[in-house]
Image (cartoon, rainbow, N blue to C red):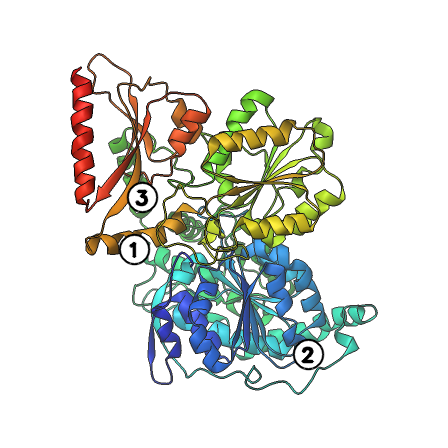
Amino acid sequence: MAERSFAREVRSLGLGDGDVFHGEGILAVAKAMLQSGVSYVGGYQGAPVSHMMDVFNDAREILEGLGVHVETCANEAAACAMLSASIHYPVRGCAVWKSTVGTNVASDALSNLASAGVTGGALIVVGEDYGDGSSIIQERSHAFAMKSQVWLLDPRPSLPAMVRAVEKGFELSEASNTPVMLELRIRACHVHGSFATKTNRAPAYSSRRLLEGPRFDYGRICLPPATYMQEQQKVKERWPAAVEFIREHGLNEHMPASGLDTLEDIGIITQGGMYNAVRRALALLGFAQETGCTRIPIFVLNVTYPLVPQEISRFCAGKRAVLVVEEGQPNYLEQAIGSLLRRADVNAELHGKGPFPMAGEYTGEVMLRGVDTFLREVLGHNEAPDPEIVGAVDDAKRRAAEILAAPVPGRPPGFCTGCPERPVFSALKIVQREVGDVHVSADIGCHTFATLPPFNVGNTVLGYGLGLASSAAIRPHMGKRTVSIMGDGGFWHNGLTTGVASSVYNESDDVLIVMNNGYTSATGGQAIPSTRVGAETGTGASRPFTESGTGGSRSIEAALRGVGVKWVRRVRTYSVEKMVRTLRAALTGSTRGLKVIVADGECQLMRQRRYRPWFSKRLEAGRRVVRTRFGVDEDVCTGDHSCIRLSGCPSLTVKESADPLRTDPVAHVNNDCVGCGVCGEVAHAAVLCPSFFRAEVVNNPSAWDRFLHGLRSRVIGALARA
């Protein structure tokens, strides 16, 4: 069960000749793969390219009809390794992962794949998650394309252009015997549009039409001396073949100037993914029309690596100034284009990282200011854009600041309401009061939010599943045990081998907390090997996650014991007091060696996605339903708000006291409460105050419920009067 279902939308993947597809970019890319005769698709679900693997998993019925194999891979390296099927055999395959962090993991397999080369088309779809809204480190995929000598497509965010990039990407791969990366920005994945479809092509080879037998070619094995020849083939055969294919098939696009008052002596070269933003900026500045006409010629690099020298020099010839729109740093394209023009003796002046910032996302405002700055630098005063256009942006921001009367407060990401991981960090904060501060090696996942207030827990973050490995050199220099955090997704991704097995082998005396929430929650709730089977539809949040069904932490525990971990404890995350005791024992006990605490609690978002439909159906049917809620007794609350500092739950806030004699606000639990009980558990474990109470809200109460309610009300009323 993922964050989003495409069960309805995937029907459009069956459209044929003469039909028109209407929908989202990610579905269009999937449709293009089926039209191209793809044989197999593999990807890491925990790093989705805006739900690419979710689409394929929901479309298994259509894929099975064509004989297309879909594999959910343990990590990006496994997905890239699948492309080995295309090295010797004329089968088309696709691997899917997320940007640089995924390519980092896959780089070993990618290097070997690029060196050996391919026979069948091998397409790698990477989500270029760059910019302020990114969840990853700020790097670009371009460097990997250059390093491994694979070709990089960056199509215009238009459905026909993206579909053509997929189809031509497979052909380019086969024409040059080289893997091809297709870079999709997140916005491109969600752009809507239409295109004329073709009938899906059954793969040339599949489970329905088997290969004749295995092939062997020592020249494609990555061992010396074959590797030396493969490197020569990259630059002497594959590169020229790729450049010729790109040129012959017109993969890059020249958008000529049209209409009145064209400016042929200047031009813009842009990455394909930036084209829409460039056109919008030109339109706002009065240099283009919404219908498509532009006064300035534009050259769109739908293939950003390799460049075609003849196309670049031909576009720039006769121009006095050219703007290179390249998002991110380093400015690979600007440097390469400058070198190409010098060799071709074309003297157009290049502008790029000057009008535009050196790094950062090219948002609408950044694009508008960058294009405006370029036009002002190269055009005379009379031809420059109206300064009031950019000034209007400044005026709007100024007016907003005046209305707000203060800077807008930052809204960093944080744990969801009822998140099972929050109480673990509450417990850790409580334990550190006793044992002193400890070094905490954080990891990639929801639990990274603990580095933010109110917890501020986590000294380092090195990579997915690397929390334990990153603490290896710290404990010997710290003189005390360290705590490492790892999610169950990271555990199966590579944490079991890279962290746990290595720690056991080196006899490390540290503490590891594995957050077993049942899914790769941070990226949409995709299933992992320990996801519980037969999960209940609607259970109280207070019930242990693994109480019913199979899987859960039991699979994780078996894996831990299998690599030699002897000290393993499973603790329900919402049991803060028990978690405190277990952490204390792990940090201060006499047992040597790695100590692992499996913090067991289902992702609250995934639980709510199951629970709410179940709850609504029971309500509609008039059946009795009980909801657990927590509250704060205002008369008992002291107003010191320690509960908020140790919990940080979004449903726990403050409000003015109803008592006119009290000036300080009191704690309050709002309507977002999901009844996880963390606030009360934390208050109890930290010995804060007895102001928290638990209440059960009964919908469609029975006669017995009404009788009990009346009886309790009368007893409480009598006691209050007494």
Mark pair 2, 1: CA separation: 49 Å
Q: Amino acid at mark 3?
A: Val
Up-down relation of residue 409 to residue 99 (above or below): above
Residue type, mark 2 in image: His
Disc 2 on helix, strand or loop? helix
Q: How many marks?
A: 3
Determine the secondary structure under disc 1: helix
**Residue 393: mark:** 3
Read off the residue under disc 1.
613
Query: How far across and down, in percent of the image, does residue 284 sit?
Result: 31, 55
Above/below status of 340 relative to 281: below
Q: Secondary structure at mark 3?
A: helix
Task: Sort mark 2 into few (<14), some (14-19) or many (20+) by Cα contacts within 10 Å.
Answer: some
The residue that appears at 56% across and 50% down in the rendered structure is 554
Dot 3 and dot 2 residues touching (CB under 8 Å): no
Q: Quadrant of the C terminus?
A: top left
Labels 1 and 3: the sequence-earlier one: 3
